Image: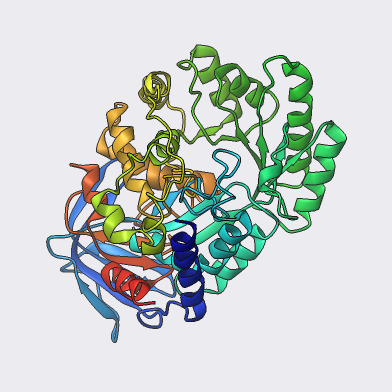
Amino acid sequence: MKLAIAALLAAACAREGAGVVANEPPRDLAIVGVTVVHPADAREERDRTVVVSGGVITAVGPRATTRVPDGARVIDGRGSWVIPGLIDAHVHFFQSGDPFTRPDAADFRDVIPYTWEDARNRARLPATFATYLAAGVTSAVDPGGPMWNFDVRDLAAQSAVAPRLAVTGPLVSLVDDPKLDLGDPPIIKCATPDEARALVARELARHPDFIKVWFIHDKKGDLDKESEIVRAAADAAHAGHVRLFVHATELEVAKAALRSGADVLVHSAFDKPVDDDFIALMKERGAILIPTLYVRHGYADVFSRTWAPTDEERHLADPDILAMMDAVPRPRAPRTIDDKPAFASLAKLVAAGVPVALGTDAGNVGTLHGAGVFREARLMIDAGLTPAQVLRAATVGGAAVLGLSDKLGDVAPGRLADLVVLDADPLTSVDHLARSRVVIRAGRAYDPAALMAELRSR
């Protein structure tokens, strides 16, 4: 097994010499006769023409009266719907989603050294970027990784085929995670407020889009003292004009994070349903919640060898990662994940007006880059949201996480031209979010099938 997996990894790295190329240079384009979907209020406008120039939407109006610029590429939008590009508000590019990507969760380094996994993940970044666009995800947020995360952002900005990225560096952590430390750790323990401030200062020098804290509470520890470290990180981040994201998966810890200055919570509370105090704190802070309902299932399913790809993952995920998914050397017994608290909370939060964004935590074991958004969308439906509310979370909510609410999240003049043309109505089923005909990122049009065909050919 070790030799077979090593061969897969070697092949994955060897094929990375050729980059994915864009379908064509960006130019003016028009989507003609399309139904425009506005996620903020679930409004649809039929038989519209959307005009894009210079990477920006310049006109949205009736087909009969909206002029198409001379020489523009024309996309026949009849029988189609156009939405803003999907936004995955929680991903990790230093992780692949395969069974070997988190040795702190299951240590298989005797089979695949973590250095190999790390090298493959870096080499496959262009492929990973392509899977996002193929899935209609035109923006992604990476809340924490090694300092080379900033290089990932630079690479995406220079690539013809990549989502719009926001990133930060290592997590300000209350605990150690040495198995992930290869000299540039993604998680760094800060035992005092001064250590937290020092780490934030080091990251601010690289111009992060935000700072993140990994708020792992020691049950025997002092939550107030731990909160002082979070408060120090928050104050330093805010002084540097960036927001604070916090990983806190227990209700009381999440409340402590909000009181300490958190602007975005990257997980639901999994131990108990939210209460009125939590909702009041979220509103007081103007904070955003990213539920991440699927990610714990991914670990349980992969390590028990019960994980199976969805139709979208079979067609849209990195084939080299798919080939690794059942290569678990020492399977565990299946276990049940208790979703009740998080599921009970989500619809309540949305009804209360708390901003929610769709995020997958992609890269964690079993949660694949790109196509993972469709698993998450379906679980949000299971938790009581409507397709319109899920679409809003995946567009308007994600734009708020990015700090680009005035630039993304709607199909309107002046917005950035990150769009997806679907062949089915996304307001009737979240399954339709996967039925993309054309994906447009910064005014450049891509054929999802062609992106994946090119990826498989390498």
The N terminus: image quadrant: bottom left
Looking at this rendering, what residue extends furthest in the right direction?
Answer: 194
Residue at 75% from the left image edge and 52% from the top image edge: 203
The figure's colour scheme reads rainbow
- Quarter assignment of residue 167: bottom right
Of 63 and 387, which appears nearest the observer? 387
Q: Is residue 151 above or below residue 166?
A: below
Q: Residue furthest bottom?
A: 71
Q: Is residue 100 above or below residue 453?
A: above
Where's residue 353, x and y in %? 43, 27
Residue 418 at x, y percent in the picture: 39, 62
Snapshot quadrant of residue 103: top right
Q: Nearer the viewer, residue 440 or 197?
A: 197
Is residue 16 or residue 380 the one in the foreground? 16
Write the residue at 29% across / 81% down: 72
Count of number-bearing discs: 0
Q: Is residue 214 above or below residue 384?
A: below
**As drawn, is 280 to the left or to the right of 437?**
right
State the image coordinates of residue 175 (x, y, percent, origin top left). Answer: 72, 32
Is residue 366 shown to the viewer in this render? yes
The quadrant of the image that shows the C terminus is bottom left
Would residue 40 be seen by someone viewing this image from the given angle?
no
Q: Position of residue 169 (x, y in %)?
A: 68, 51
Residue visible at 20% across and 42% down in the picture: 429
Instruction: Tell me if 11 is positioned left or right of 49 in this view.
Output: right
Of 56 and 129, nearer the camera is 129
